[in-house]
Amino acid sequence: MNTQLLNKNKMTIKHSLIFVFLIAFLFNYPSIFAQKKEFIVVLDAGHGGKDPGKIGYNHAKEKDIALKIVLQVGEILEREKNIKVIFTRKTDVFVDLWERGRIANKADADLFVSIHCNAHSSQASGSETWVLGTHVNRQNFEVAKAENSVILMEDNYEMKYKGFDPNSPDSVIGLTLMQEEYLDKSIQLASIIQEGFTNKLNRIDRGVKQAGFVVLHQTYMPSVLIETGFLTNVDEGTYLNTNVGQDKFSQSISSDILKYIQQLTLNTVLSTNVAINENNSASKTNTPIDKNISNIFSKIEFKVQIASGANKIDTKPYNFKGLSNVERVQVDGSYKYYLGSTSDYSEIKKLHELAKSKGYTSAFIVAFENGKKIPVEDIIKKS
């Protein structure tokens, strides 16, 4: 009887130790349960202080409306775990464009969102979202010129911007490829925001556009500039100058930023899952699920996108920080630059890390099936 009791106690202790070990494992296993790094969003309210921005119907000022929307967007985002919000301004003060970019870069931000209001001599209306681009037509240049002209109010602007002339199309064309490295992700967010304005707020969709905005050029992360609507339009200007209108825009923008972050997270999930499978050395044979994933991956061509933009760059290693095997593909008047090509996901992950180590910190993995680009999340669903 004593022997049975002793054995029973031993088993109870053993099971307790296993349970404690399992709990400790679950809360400390870095590949799955580690806390994610904070996602840093910099929110920029356009204009401010001595720079009122656009003046619209009933003397509404762009600087005031942009600030109110930005503060509300920030309040919503700050409720989310693992999201840190930084404001370029929280009051009616003048902040130069150089300083706005410096704030974002110093914070090592993951996203920069600048919020503005539009104006026109006609009763034009609608919302549009801009990304940095060197595509210069006259209309887009004039939009960028109007926003960039604020640098002339800044002290010592000649030294800060090293000869950049907001009135010169050549200066806009001179924006570097390094900034265009983030173009795809910027367009991704801009498209989500425009879809929200159109479907949730019933705004006229003026589309995602490209121009040479200095405030975007100064940042080293995916960045967008939102023109919420036209203050000079009687209906739209009135709406933007109300609490209801500002609330609606704030809710739409914040939810779309969260949607963008979620899409980025899906891309990370695939990487984590594959890493777990590869490091699972306990099993020497493939399970049916492993075979299924292997079959799916064999039909996929993975590449690492390291840059994109309007400039046609020779794919020699000296143009890409020593990286060889860079491919240039023309897509709708611009160029995308890919590193590598393989169906082996572990191999493409190594190339992805190599690209980031060379300074292409916003490089990301893309997938093609039968020559057609497909979302990475589609592979997650299949696997």
Image (cartoon, rainbow, N blue to C red):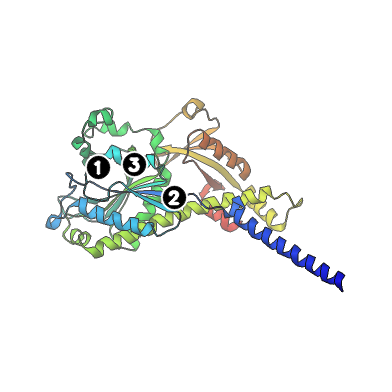
Give the residue pinned by disc 2: 39
Question: Which tag, 1 or 2, sits closer to the chain's start?
Answer: 2
Q: Is mark 2 on a helix, strand or loop?
A: strand
User: Residue 104: x percent and y percent?
Assistant: 36, 42
| Residue nearer the viewer, 100 or 321 | 100
| Residue type at the position of mark 2 | Phe
User: Residue visible at 55% across and 39% down?
Assistant: 353
| Residue type at the position of mark 3 | Ile
Contact between labelled residues 1 and 3, with CB atoms less than 8 Å apart: no
Give left or right: position of 115 versus 259.
Answer: left
| Residue nearer the viewer, 83 or 121 | 83
User: Residue visible at 28% across and 60% down?
Assistant: 203
Looking at the rendered structure, which numbered label has been put on residue 369? none
User: Residue visible at 14% across and 50% down?
Assistant: 121
Is residue 344 in view from this perspective?
no
User: Residue visible at 46% across and 41% down?
Assistant: 362
Check the picture and name the quadrant holding the N terminus. Answer: bottom right
Contact between labelled residues 2 and 1, with CB atoms less than 8 Å apart: no
Q: Is mark 3 on a helix, strand or loop?
A: helix
Q: Is mark 1 on a helix, strand or loop?
A: loop
Looking at the rendered structure, which numbered label has been put on residue 103? 3
Is residue 44 in view from this perspective?
yes
Give left or right: position of 239 versus 105.
Answer: left
User: Residue 378: x percent and y percent?
Assistant: 54, 55
Callout 3 crowding tier (Cα within 10 Å): few <14, some 14–19, many ≥20: some
| Residue type at the position of mark 1 | Val
Report, in whole angstroms, how far the alpha carbon at label 1 lies from the one at label 2. 24 Å
User: Residue 241: x percent and y percent?
Assistant: 20, 60
Report, in whole angstroms, how far the alpha carbon at label 3 lies from the one at label 1. 11 Å
Q: Outermost residue toward the left?
A: 58
Give the residue pinned by disc 1: 95
Question: Which tag, 3 or 1, sits closer to the chain's start?
Answer: 1
